[in-house]
Image (spheres, grey):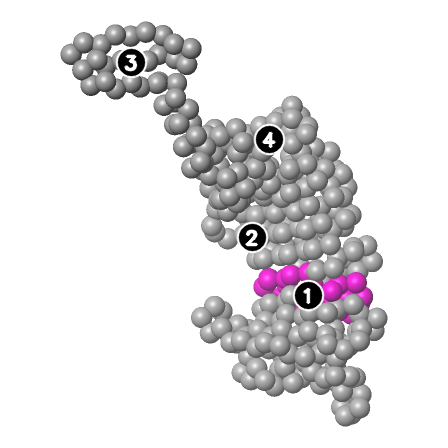
Amino acid sequence: MTFSDYKSSRGVILNFTAGFYAYDIVALREISRRHVRATRLPLELAEMVIDMCNDRGTLLACALTCRAWLPRTRYNLLRIVDIHDRRQLTCFAQFLTKNKAFDALVAEICIHLPPDDPRMLSLFPALLARKVTKCTRLHILRASSGPPLQIHPSTGFFVLLPEFSHITKLILTSVVFSSLTELTSLVLYIRGLLDLRCTNVRWEQLPPPTESWGCRALAKGSGLLRIDLDMQPELLNQLSLRLVHLQLVSRVEVLHVTKIQPCLDDTINIGHLLQAPRSSLRELHIGVIDPPDFESIIATVQYVSDGTTDGPGRRLQEEWEIRSQSRNCYVNRQYSCELYRSGPY
């Protein structure tokens, strides 16, 4: 077989004398490029896939694969930042110092406190103050499974907290404060806080029954609109039920209280909560631990009044409706009920 090579204006043409076939290499490359463009994943669809991905390693791979994917990948990597130790906290602070434009992407910061270094929490406001100006959610939790972790916020921690006035949602999970006052200070120093959610939160020093400074400070100083309390029953008696009498609910719109003990005092307090004057409360989710008669407790809640048929209990029945009741005998034998305000408020 003989063949000759020569150049043309379109590229290199291989002229096979025996087979009389001519191949334009440049034309073949152009056809290949058109095929790739025709089968390429649309950018909008690729961004939707990236938004549904929560694995950090996969997101990093996406950022290195295609330059067009980088903005959406960067957004998902920085939207929720998980910090597990001091090294990560320091590196993140240095990153924001060098890349100030990226602070607007940070929406939530999760501080995972390691059991061997709970004081890492005190470094958080010192390193990140004025660097995450668009962050609206702060989550403080124990880094690993186990009993709640005792934390020791320093004085400087509370002094710098007002710098985070843009935070509107605070989530506390499996942590122990030294006192109720310390928890109250954390809430009050974040001045823009609207949503407080506590799960398995405790404090060491139990205040006497007559001491209600923490609750009174919350009632006067906070602008909370939603409170979720999933705590030990004895702590709920000190916190959530006292808030009723201090009329914190004049601003709160949604209240979740679980692990209530099935005693008459608790249900009466819930009744007072429902009929609090000038209350903006619209949703009340309550969970009662293993009550002997769940229906009777709900009836007590609905009809707590002076015993007359046209008193406050009558008004409660007209304004509030029970939309759902459930009995969960597998998780702490807890019975739950959701009440929604249906009348004027």
Tag 2: Cα neighbours inside 10 Å, few (<14), some, or many (≥20)? many
Cα distance in 3D space between marks 2 and 4: 24 Å
Decide which of tag 4 and tag 1 comes sooner along the chain: 4
Cα distance in 3D space between marks 4 and 3: 57 Å
Which label lies toward us, 1 or 3? Answer: 3
Decide which of tag 2 and tag 1 comes sooner along the chain: 2
In the structure shown, which secondary structural element does the residue marked by tag 3 occupy? strand
Do callouts 2 and 4 mark residues in contact (Cβ within 8 Å)?
no
Decide which of tag 3 and tag 2 comes sooner along the chain: 3
Cα distance in 3D space between marks 3 and 2: 74 Å
Residue bearing mark 4: 92
Residue 257 seen in render: yes
Residue beneath the point at 71% across and 78% down: 320
In the structure shown, which secondary structural element does the residue marked by tag 2 occupy? loop
Would you identify the image quadrant in which residue 345 lies? Answer: bottom right
Residue 265 seen in render: no
Tag 4: Cα neighbours inside 10 Å, few (<14), some, or many (≥20)? some
Q: Which residues are magenta?
A: 227-255
